[in-house]
Image (tube, helix red, strand yellow):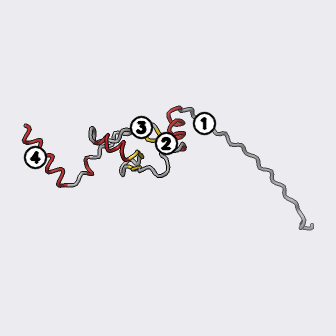
Amino acid sequence: MGVCIHCALKIEVSFSITVDMMYCEATALLQGCVMASPECCIRYEAMAPGVDTMQLPACEHVYHVECITKWFNVKPTCPVCRENYLEFLPAAYKVLGERMRAVRE
């Protein structure tokens, strides 16, 4: 008996992938906002070239310097996510603030 040297081997492979997308309007809105041009949520205006802007260090939200300065005169938080920025006060200001609160009490 002889050995077949020229045996052909044919393999067929097929597969399918099903991708399900879960609908979540909030996630879609957030992604759309991230993709949009930056807009100051205090003034509701786009950031124009040459206008002074500030990106907050912890949350990275961007505002017109004038807008966030006015906001911080009222509240120490980010207008969007409410991140507290009191931790960024220099130590001398923290001490002075504590003394002023103690005098009021």
| Residue nearest the viewer, comparing 25 with 62 | 62
The location of residue 35, given as percent across then percent down, is 54, 44
> Dots 1 and 3: beta carbons under 8 Å?
no
The location of residue 45, given as percent across then percent down, is 47, 39
Q: Nearer the viewer, mark 1 or mark 2?
A: 2
Q: What amino acid type is highlighted by mark number 3?
A: Arg
Identify which residue is drawn at 51% across, 43% down: 34
Q: Which mark is residue 43?
A: 3
Quadrant in which the N terminus appears:
bottom right
Q: Which badge, 4 or 1, comes first in the chain's sequence?
A: 1
Q: What amino acid type is highlighted by mark number 1?
A: Met
Q: What amino acid type is highlighted by mark number 4?
A: Arg
- Residue found at the far front of this picture: 50
Residue, disc 2: 46
Q: Secondary structure at mark 2?
A: strand
Residue, disc 4: 99
Q: Residues within 10 Å of mark 3 (few under 14, many from 20)?
A: few
Q: Which badge, 1 or 2, comes first in the chain's sequence?
A: 1
Q: Nearer the viewer, mark 4 or mark 2?
A: 2
Label 4 to label 3, Cα distance in Å? Answer: 35 Å
Q: Is residue 88 above or below residue 82?
A: below
Q: Nearer the viewer, mark 1 or mark 3?
A: 3
> Dots 1 and 2: beta carbons under 8 Å?
no
Q: Is residue 74 left or right of residue 101?
A: right
